[in-house]
Amino acid sequence: MTEMLEISDLTVHFQINQGAIEAVDHINLTIRRGEILGLVGESGSGKSVTSFAILRLIRPPGRVVSGSVHFDGIDLGSLPEEQMRRMRGAKIAMVSQTPRTALNPLLTVGRQISRLLMVHAGLSTREAEKRMLEMLRLVRIPAPERRANQYPHQLSGGMCQRIMIAMALATSPQLLLADEPTTGLDVSIAAKILDLLRELRTKTGAAIMLVTHDLGVVAETCDRVAVMHAGQVVECAPVRDLFHNPAHPYTKALVRSIPRVDRDVVLEPISGSVPSLVNPPSGCRYAGRCEWAMDRCRVSRPPIVEAAPGHVVACYGFEERRGTC
Ligand SMILES: Nc1ncnc2c1ncn2[C@@H]1O[C@H](COP(=O)(O)OP(=O)(O)OP(=O)(O)O)[C@@H](O)[C@H]1O
């Protein structure tokens, strides 16, 4: 697998009256061709802002303060808006957490997909109709001919989410940004949506960035995981490695907080709360919640170091304990 997306030193701020919300702070991430990368972290850790920044959809009062996003070697930040718009439809697609509101309530779902195919893939009306039905079958919409003629309000939440995925995949994107695609769905429907994402990756070869706060979802679906805390990536590792050998105390706490059906555990909430992102601490943003915190954690931000091949972590405490834990 080779790198398809490279995020380097990305920083995004939102200017409000009290100052700048430092929502994403100097993050580095890569997504490889054909892989599913999980982006996890508590609410407000900067996961969605990262997705929007990839698509260059940060709007005022937000702005990208520094850094770059390269897709297939192309610097997205320097593309003219018209080319970026084409890139969004054709090569990088997004599935949001609110499918029902993202769909047009005035158009049948079939019409929405076929319009997209006509605009982005240049298909004729007839070709677009045919392909639209294929897409509905691909995302396992039962009785696709009938469903295509229905409006979003006539479909369940799970069905709307599949329609969103069909729309996102209609133009065969190379990268799918799936932002909490199972939020609000019941457990069995959520499991089907995740199956679908895995199957689509295999069938289409697309890479997927799966944004979620649910580590259980990550364990079942992803190849690699990046953990965000308060706008920073604190750890990134292959999925098995992250669950078996978490290196950062925040990741350890997240892993400890996953409910397990195979053993009786008392769930441990993560202590403390995410620091304010307006004038956040200058050192490690987890220091105020961390059992390992030392003086230097509060002063300077720990650099990213390799914990194992392909497994990186930003933690002075880990470096001190390396080899002893
Ligand atoms: N339009 C905006 N204006 C001001 N602040 C914003 C805006 N959008 C995001 N933020 C701030 O940026 C930070 C990161 O938000 P983001 O939505 O990326 O978090 P998240 O990790 O995706 O959380 P969740 O899991 O709840 O979706 C938060 O502090 C949020 O308040």
Image: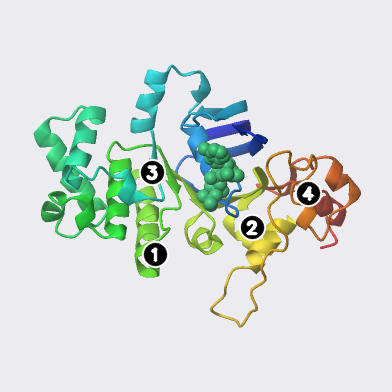
Q: Which of marks 2 and 3 is nearer the N terminus?
A: 3
Q: Which of 21 and 228 is in front in this view?
A: 21
Q: Calculate the distance from the C-alpha at mark 2 to the C-alpha at mark 3.
A: 24 Å
Q: Calculate the distance from the C-alpha at mark 2 to the C-alpha at mark 1.
A: 22 Å
Left or right: 66 with respect to 96? right
Q: Is mark 2 on a helix, strand or loop?
A: helix
Give amino acid for label 2. Answer: Leu
Foreground label between 4 and 2: 4
Disc 2 Cβ-to-ligand 1 distance below 8 Å? no
Q: Which of marks 2 and 1 is nearer the N terminus?
A: 1
Q: What element carries label 1?
A: helix
**What residue is disc 4 on?**
315
Q: Earlier in the sequence, mark 3 or mark 1?
A: 1
Q: What residue is drawn where x is 74% and y is 42%?
A: 280
Q: Calculate the distance from the C-alpha at mark 3 to the C-alpha at mark 4.
A: 34 Å
Determine crowd level at label 2: few under 14, some 14-19, many 20+ residues with C-alpha closer than 10 A. Answer: many
Q: Calculate the distance from the C-alpha at mark 4 to the C-alpha at mark 2.
A: 15 Å
**What residue is disc 1 on?**
191
In the rendering, at what x and y percent does residue 159 appear? Answer: 27, 57
Tell me if I can see residue 34 in this picture. Answer: yes
Q: Calculate the distance from the C-alpha at mark 3 to the C-alpha at mark 1.
A: 20 Å
Q: Earlier in the sequence, mark 4 or mark 2?
A: 2
**What residue is disc 3 on?**
205
Labels 4 and 1 touching (C-beta < 8 A): no
Labels 4 and 2 touching (C-beta < 8 A): no
Q: Which residue lies furthest to the front in this view?
A: 17
**What residue is disc 2 on?**
242
Left or right: 295 with respect to 145? right
Q: Which of 266 and 106 is in front in this view?
A: 106
Tell me if I can see residue 246 in this picture. Answer: no
